[in-house]
Amino acid sequence: MISSYAKKHHRKLKPKPAPSPNNSNYYDSKTFNVMDYGAKGDGKTDDTNAFKNAWLDACKAGNSEVLVPADYTFLLGPLDLSVQCNNIIFQLNGNLLASTSSSAWKGNLLQWLNFRYVTDLRIQGTGRIDGQGLAWWNKKNGFSTAPTALRVADVKGSTVVGISFVNSAKAHLKFDNCDGVLVDTISIQSPGESPNTDGIHLQNSVNVEIRESKISSGDDCISIQTGCENVFIDRVACGPSHGISIGGLGKNGEKATVSGVIVQDSTITSSMTGTRIKTWQGGSGAVSNVSFTNIRVSKVDTPIVIDQYYSDEGHTQNKTSAVAVTDISFVKIQGTYNQKAVSIACSDNSPCKGVTLSNIGLNSASLETESPLCYRAYVSVEDPVSPSINCKG
């Protein structure tokens, strides 16, 4: 449910909850147990083919369930499930363990578990997905490309509920080109120093709802990239991490668009940033109609960030074009920070417009902090805002 704060400050689009798969279609589903296809579940034998064959048969039947039973650990290499399917449940009650054998990963594969071309997909259960990321984080092992743990792509109507992720080599859960996404009560955990381990990564996906989940990672808890519209994030516990971020957008002069994002009633702890929008200089397109509302932060370096100078190599110079940032609200952001409460750094050639700061209460958790930054932004400051900030556009 969208909070009253978000309703007041969200100007145009209101992201609608993602349509989850039509559960009535599943009542008469047929079950395909991976054990019936030769899976051992001993954590040592490669069970990849058993999973693939169970999936193929389930897809042929339609309106089916692939069962991964509890009390087993299944060792899997790259599992590409790119098959046209309708009304499929992937019931994950056991544990999945990524193979770390170099022979399994020849060809620099980008995904571990890849679900694609499904209409109404439900991935659910009490099981765990363990990416064994340390094998990739340790460069001495020779892996040149780290895979995403679970990718859902080109799917209409997808639900991921209940499962847990640990130690993905790269991003834990990724949605590409999806319409109608629901993520509910999942857990994601990887070390704060693990490289590029986004919790949930969204790209070219619309009508997304993420709720009641716990995420800690070495990168963004939730990363919203270009092509996303109508995204609703509610009651997420984030951190340690790099925060909840939109971008970076516009790299290498690319056009990028994100619109209609609501983040509300969430907590961010021990993170590099809290609520953040980041764009590269030289890009084009727009980030618009975004609200961060009722966010509790604790020991976050910089809780509120708009950075139109984002770069892998630090601050960059103005270019003639930039991704426009308009109609952005930060409302009831409260808690403690370590370095700087607010950092809004916008482009000389494309200043941020329609930014609102309202009911901000941020206290220093450190003896050494910097003053808030506001550069080239048209900001409406609605009291109370603490620490005070001077924005002149």
Image (spheres, rainbow, N blue to C red):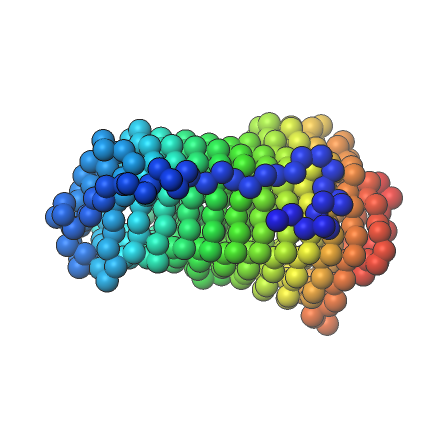
Residue 311 at x, y percent in the picture: 60, 42
Which residue is more in the foreground, 255 or 42? 42
Q: Would you place residue 258 above or below residue 304 in this image?
A: above
Which residue is more in the foreground, 378 or 14? 14
Hey, which quadrant is residue 44 in on the image? bottom left
Which residue is more in the foreground, 38 or 162? 162
Q: Would you place residue 184 above or below residue 300 in this image?
A: above
Q: How many marks?
A: 0
Q: Which residue is the extreme one toward the bottom?
A: 367
Q: Quadrant of the C terminus?
A: top right
Residue at x-position 20% and y-position 36%: 57
Could you tell whether 280 is left or right of 331 in the image? left
Residue 330 at x, y percent in the picture: 73, 50
Could you tell whether 370 is left or right of 301 in the image? right
Q: Would you place residue 86 above or below residue 137 in this image?
A: above
Q: Would you place residue 328 above or below residue 4 in this image?
A: above
Residue at x-position 76% and y-position 45%: 8
Could you tell whether 350 is left or right of 69 in the image? right
Residue at x-position 36% and y-position 46%: 123
Residue 193 at x, y percent in the picture: 48, 60
Residue 233 at x, y percent in the picture: 58, 48
Residue at x-position 18% and y-position 42%: 49
Which residue is more in the foreground, 14 or 164? 14
Could you tell whether 111 is left or right of 254 in the image? left
Does the rendering let one see residue 248?
no
Does the rendering let one see residue 46?
yes
